[in-house]
Image (cartoon, rainbow, N blue to C red):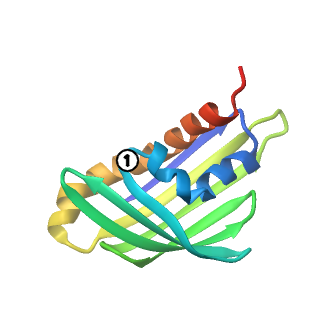
Amino acid sequence: MKTVTSETVPFTAQQMYDLVVDMDAYATFIPWCAAARKLEETDEQFIAEITFTFKGMRETFRTLDKVIPGKQVDISLKSGPFRRLSSQWRFIDLEQGGSKIDFSIDFQFKNKLMDLALGSVFGTASKKMVATFRKRAFELYDQK
């Protein structure tokens, strides 16, 4: 299942990028995320491990996240319950202020039953990712 979402936010591309790569904070604001952490990190990439829970199911997956600091994160599956998982975050500063966020994700679970049970739910959750990070940005950066 592939989903693509774009949104304009009143925060800089760097601020939004910083939220996306701050794995340690995920469990505090992403509802389905039980745990997240970086396992290895260089200037160009990191290995991420995320544990999600839903209706009594608990699964952990690892990704390779290649970064262009302040601009882009390309995510590919290393291991976990997916047959395929790839996603991309792009952050573009706008002349009038704020930035545009583009988020795309394509995934399929390995297990057909899990894909039937969670595929549409996970797809909906992934569509809400940009809104979740937007809300987090308002909590952290909006001083009004």
34 vs 47, left or right, is left
Callout 1: 10 Å neighbours few (<14), some, many (20+)? some
Q: Answer above or below: position of 134 versus 4.
A: above
Residue 79 to residue 102: above or below? below
Q: Residue furthest left?
A: 113
Q: Is residue 65 above or below residue 135?
A: below
Q: Where is residue 125 in the image (x, y as percent from the top left)?
A: 37, 47
Q: Residue 90 placed where, x, y %?
A: 65, 56
Residue 95 drawn at (x, y percent): 85, 38
Left or right relative to 44: residue 109: left
Residue 97 quadrant: top right
Residue at screen point 83% across, 33% down:
96
Front residue of 39/2: it is: 39
Q: Circle 1 sits in a helix, a strand or a loop, which is it?
A: helix
Q: What residue type is labelled 1?
A: Ala
| Rendered location of residue 6, percent (x, y) | 58, 44
Q: Is residue 63 left or right of residue 9?
A: left
The residue at the far top in this view is 144
Residue at the image position 50 percent from the left and 40 percent from the top: 132
Residue lying at 55% horizontally and 59% vertically, measured from the top left? 23
**Residue plotted at (65% across, 36% down):** 140
Query: Which residue is tagged 1?
Result: 125
Quarter of the image containing the N terminus? bottom left
